Amino acid sequence: MPDVLQIALKDETSTLVLIPHAGSVRAQTLRVPVGDAGDVAFVEAGTIVVILFAFVYLLRSIVRASRAQRVAVEVPATKKDS
């Protein structure tokens, strides 16, 4: 074991396991389906539509929550005046 590692692992509770090099193992190929390059325009258009719908939904939710909060704050103020 190199001296640098021995110095770093002076703590008796630490353990270092070195995995031996396996030179005879062949590399494996991983095939991932990524789609057709001709569909890029449809994917981009769909992404834009989904993002716009999400933006509108979040904006609508924020406005509704803001209005509900404003009404909740104004109602007690009008009851005090009565």
Image (cartoon, rainbow, N blue to C red):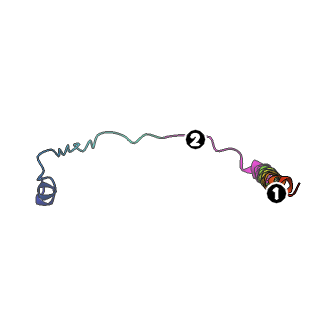
Picture coordinates of residue 25, whole percent (x, y): 32, 39
Residue 45's x, y, as percent?
A: 81, 53
Which residue occupies the extreme front position in the image?
A: 82
The residue pinned by badge 1 equals 77
Along the line of sight, the residue nearer the viewer: 54 or 34: 54
Helix, strand or loop at label 1? It is helix
Q: Position of residue 62 (x, y in %)?
A: 77, 54
- Give amino acid for label 1: Ala
Question: In this view of the protein, which residue sits in the foreground, 78 or 30?
Answer: 78
The residue type indicated by label 2 comes to: Val
Magenta residue check for 63: no
Residue 55, image quadrant:
bottom right
Q: Say whether residue 74 is left or right of residue 14.
A: right
Residue labelled with disc 2: 32
Query: Which image quadrant for residue 82?
Result: bottom right
Mark 2 secondary-structure assignment: loop
**Residue 73 location, quadrant:** bottom right
Which of 40/50 is in front?
50
Label at residue 2? none
Query: Residue most toward the bottom?
Result: 4
Give the side of residue 6 with respect to residue 30, left or right.
left
Toward the right, the furthest residue is: 82
Mark 2–mark 1 CB contact (< 8 Å): no
Look at the image and give the residue range highlighted in magenta. 30-47
Q: Residue at x 82, y 57 (%)?
A: 77
